[in-house]
Amino acid sequence: MRISMEKKTLDIIHKNKYNHTDRGGAVKRRDLINKLKENGFVLDRHGSNHDIYFNEKTKKRIPVGRHREIDDLLAKEIMKEAGI
């Protein structure tokens, strides 16, 4: 009985840690980029894995990964870093 209870607990922890849909979904990359552009960011350069957006007014550089969808929590962190 104890072994099955531990396995069940580990399965629940694993599901919550790695299942992105439990955390609210994802944001389309183009929507995030459009929001950055609306707030004064322009494409500065292409990095190896990210595109770098720059805002001349605030002097901030924001990296945006090249995925079709960006996890909701990461999108919120990008927006927070951008000051939006």
Image (spheres, grey):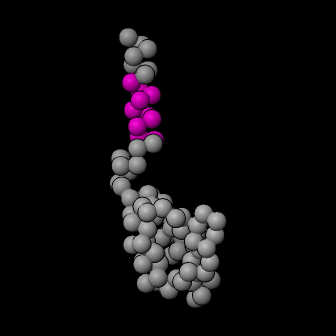
Place of residue 26 in the rendered image (x, y in percent of width and height, measured from the top left): 38, 59
Quick check: 6 above or below 47?
above
Q: Is residue 50 left or right of residue 29?
A: right
Q: Is residue 52 left or right of residue 26?
A: right
Numbered circles on residues, count: 0
Dominant secondary-structure state across the stretch colored magenta: helix
The structure residue drawn at horizontal position 41% and vertical position 29%, both measured from the top left corner, is 11
From this viewpoint, which residue is outermost toward the top?
A: 1
Residue 60 visible here: no
Residue at image position (40%, 49%) is 20
Q: Which residues are magenta?
A: 8-17
| Nearest to the observer: residue 48 or residue 52 | 48
Q: Is residue 1 above or below residue 54?
A: above
Is-magenta flag for residue 52? no
Residue drawn 43% across the image and 22% down it: 7
Magenta stretch: includes residue 10: yes
35, 48: nearer the viewer: 48
Placement of the N terminus among the 4 image quadrants = top left
* Quarter holding residue 8: top left
| Residue 3 or residue 18, whichever sits in front | 18
Q: Residue furthest bottom?
A: 57
Regarding residue 56, the answer to whether it shows in the image is: yes
Tell me residue 49's x, y (percent).
60, 63
Q: Could you tell me residue 32's position as x and y percent?
A: 43, 71
Q: Residue at x 51, y 67 (%)?
A: 78
